[in-house]
Structure formats: structure tokens, C-alpha cells
Image (spheres, rainbow, N blue to C red):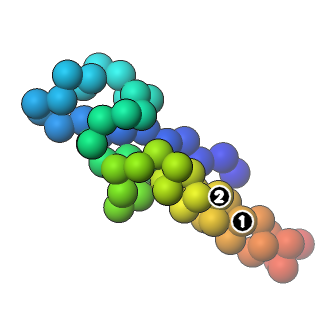
């Protein structure tokens, strides 16, 4: 499973049309499958760590089941 990161820009943000622009103070969101979840941060690096932790949880669960 791969988690995609993207920004949900605020109305006033000049980078509204660029979902992957990393240097504004808008919140980062995580997406995988049909799931969308806030990363509860505006920092891309922090969101990446959260995404990797979720991916690791899924991998661990799959290894236990299979």
C-alpha cells in the first residue's frame, strides 16, 4: 500500500492549484485507496513520517494474517 501526500490549500493561498507545493502553511493530507485523512500538520516531512508509520502498520498486519 502506498500513501500519497497532498496539500489542501486555504482560499487565500497563492499555491491553491498546486497540490504538491510543499512550502506554504496549508495542511497536509494523506490519501490511500478511498481513504483521505489529515496529517494534522503543515510540515511535509512530518506528514511523510506519519504516512510511513501507517504503511508499516498495514505491512505488519498483513504479515500476521498471511
Residue drawn where x is 35% and y is 61% of the image: 40
Q: Position of residue 5 (x, y in %)?
A: 49, 42
For the residues bearing labels 2 and 1, Cβ distance under 8 angstroms: yes
Residue 13 higher or lower than 66, as above or below: above
Residue drawn where x is 27% and y is 42% of the image: 25
Quadrant where the C terminus sits is: bottom right
Residue 36 higher or lower than 18, as above or below: below
Q: Position of residue 55 (x, y in %)?
A: 67, 60
Distance between the Cα atoms at labels 2 and 1? 6 Å
Extreme-left residue of the structure: 12
Residue drawn where x is 69% and y is 51% of the image: 1
Residue 37 higher or lower than 64, as above or below: above
Residue 30 higher or lower than 55, as above or below: above
* Residue at the spot of label 2: 52
* Residue at the spot of label 1: 56
Q: Position of residue 2 (x, y in %)?
A: 66, 46
Q: Position of residue 6 (x, y in %)?
A: 43, 38
Residue 26, picture quadrant: top left
Amino acid at each position: 500500500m502506498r500513501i500519497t501526500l497532498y496539500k489542501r490549500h486555504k482560499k487565500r493561498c497563492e499555491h491553491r492549484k498546486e497540490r504538491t507545493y510543499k512550502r506554504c502553511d496549508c495542511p497536509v493530507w494523506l490519501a490511500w485507496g478511498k481513504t483521505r485523512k489529515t496529517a494534522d500538520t503543515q510540515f511535509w516531512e512530518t506528514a511523510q513520517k506519519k504516512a510511513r508509520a501507517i504503511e508499516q502498520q498495514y505491512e505488519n498486519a498483513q504479515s500476521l494474517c498471511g
